[in-house]
Amino acid sequence: MTNQTAINELVNTNDNYRVIGISTVHLSENDLALLEELVLIEQRNDELDGMPFAFVGKRNEGYLLKMYESFDLENIKITLLQDNLYTIAQSVLNAGYRMIEFDCDANVYDCFPCCQ
């Protein structure tokens, strides 16, 4: 049985964020290499210091990126030379999302180039 009080509390919380699925075909080889590097940093429990990502994780189908509310290139210590990843992340934040699920089976978007 569902507890209606719990449902009401969870539905009305402001401690939430939106997630979008984006196909991995939009990630270049350089983007994938950077994500792999960031996953290793995350696995070592190192700080993603200066990065706009609060969390980077890998799964069989792709990657999960949780982002902070702002995306400021001037404060990023690791240079994001990978234009696709930066453009996608910036666009996603501007659209009101805070997490990207890069998945091989997710939507392909006309607004982003396909690399694979």
Image (spheres, grey):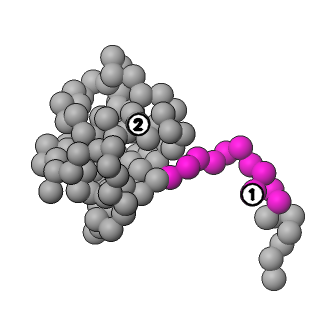
Residue 1 as seen in the image, left or right of residue 76? right
Q: Which residues are magenta?
A: 8-19
Expressed as whole percent of the image width and height from the top left, the position of residue 92 reads 44, 41
Question: At 51% across and 44% down in the image, what residue appears?
Answer: 97
**Residue that numbered label 1 is attached to:** 10
**Quadrant location of the N terminus?**
bottom right
Q: Nearer the viewer, mark 2 or mark 1?
A: 2
Question: At 63% across and 48% down in the image, what residue appears?
Answer: 16
Expressed as whole percent of the image width and height from the top left, the position of residue 24 reads 26, 57
Give the residue type at disc 2.
Answer: Ser
Sequence-earlier tag: 2 or 1? 1
Give the residue type at disc 1.
Answer: Leu
Helix, strand or loop at mark 1: helix
Q: Residue furthest front?
A: 110
Q: Establish if 99 lies above or below 108.
A: above
Helix, strand or loop at mark 2: helix
Report the Cα–Cα distance between label 2 and label 1: 28 Å
**Quadrant location of the C terminus?**
bottom left
Pick the front one: 23 or 41: 23
Q: Residue furthest right?
A: 5
**Disc marking residue 91:** 2
- 10 inside magenta stretch: yes
Q: Establish if 4 lies above or below 25.
A: below
Q: Residues within 10 Å of mark 1 (few under 14, many from 20)?
A: few
Q: Residues within 10 Å of mark 2 (few under 14, many from 20)?
A: some
Expressed as whole percent of the image width and height from the top left, the position of residue 53 reads 39, 39
* Residue 58 seen in render: no
Q: Residue furthest bottom?
A: 1
- 16 inside magenta stretch: yes
